[in-house]
Image (cartoon, rainbow, N blue to C red):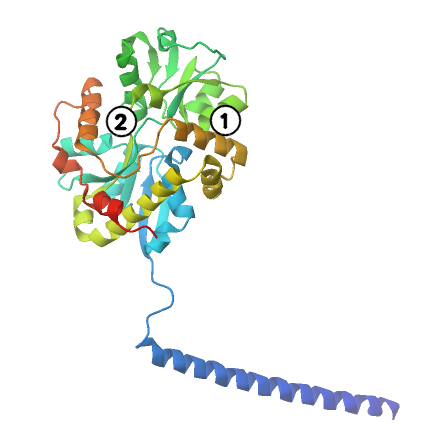
Amino acid sequence: MSLKRHFLPLLSIAALTLFLLVGCSQQDTIQKTDSQKSNSQNSSNESPSEPTLTKITLNEVAHSIFYAPMYAAIENGYFNQEGIDLQLVTGFGADKVMAAVLSGEADIGFMGPETTVYTYNEGSADAVVNFAQLTQRAGNFIVAREKTDDFKLSDLKGADVLGGRAGGMPEMVFEYVLKKNDIRPSDVNIDQSIDFGSTAAAFSGGKGAYTVEFEPSATALEQEGAGYVVSSVGVESGYVPYTAFSAKQSYLDSHKDLIQAFTNALQKGMDYVTTHTAEEIAAAIKNQFSETDADTLTMIVERYHEQDTWKNDLLFSKDSFDLLLTILEDAEVITKRPPYEALVTTEFAQKAKVSPKS
């Protein structure tokens, strides 16, 4: 009898609870259905609250702080603002980036523009055209195994130097610097058998007396005590068109609005790095270099900032293109000079330069 007195109230409570839950569930369903009907009715009259982003695959030659304006554009959301869902892939070499562009695996390539010259001279039916220049100096540094305060380029004579892949901008600009200082490249034992992405590891492992390194590899070698930065190739070379964005002519012709939006986002990234401190830039791009601490990242950004690495705009001038061809001729990797108009367009950079900044 006692059990029945306790059991019946429990049944009543359970039944009441079930009734309330069912009622709420039915009410939620009605409300949800009404909402869906309302949204369906309004969809024909109103645009979505969030615009649809268009995917672009960008293949970069390397992932380096040297390219800070591009990462600032990514991290600050400038590509999204321009309606672009940017997919960034690292190709680890200009030859690999070009292969991705030619095959259609990548929409846009970011690499040394020398590769577009090679492709054109080889008779490509669909030329890969440079539409935006990012850097105007070399971004690598000469790293010595021994610390010295009075380094001279003439110290490289007879020394073993890890220069990077033959025919690549890092190696050719390094040789250009040697010639500017009356040093024949043949007077230096330049190892061109190692891709520039692997030279730091080879140097750390004991190969070479000097190596030519981008950041953050140059600073990483210093921090581990394996090497010391003794000279900036960018300072020694002066202004050179080191890296640019390019795409097949057919893609540029059929995606003009998209390329313009992409270039607008890049220009905003350029504007950001020219109007903010090294600390602010480092904080903005930190997600791209999570393995590098904030102080080191700031120091590297400042190093690049001080040597005037980045342009204020994205224009690839004819003078810069002519200098590129001269460097290629001096390196004996080309025998004919393609016309500027065939491999460079400033249409998109010009519009991005004068467009209102948001």
Q: Which residue does the image show at 13% across and 22% down from the upper left?
A: 335
Q: Are marks 1 and 2 in contact (CB under 8 Å)?
A: no
* Secondary element at tag 1: helix
Of circles 1 and 2, which is in front?
A: 2
Q: Position of residue 89 (x, y in %)?
A: 36, 43
Work out whether residue 232 or residue 173 is closer to the camera in this orientation and state it: 232
* Picture quadrant of residue 132: top left
Q: Position of residue 86 (x, y in %)?
A: 35, 50
How far, Cα to Cα, is label 1 from label 2? 26 Å
Circle 2 crowding by C-alpha within 10 Å: few under 14, some 14–19, many from 20: many
Give the residue type at disc 2.
Answer: Val
Q: In this rendering, is residue 286 above or below 49?
A: above
Q: Which residue does the image show at 15% across and 34% down from the upper left?
A: 120
State the count of labels: 2
Q: Quadrant of the N terminus?
A: bottom right
Residue 300 in view in this figure = yes
Residue that badge 2 annotates? 240
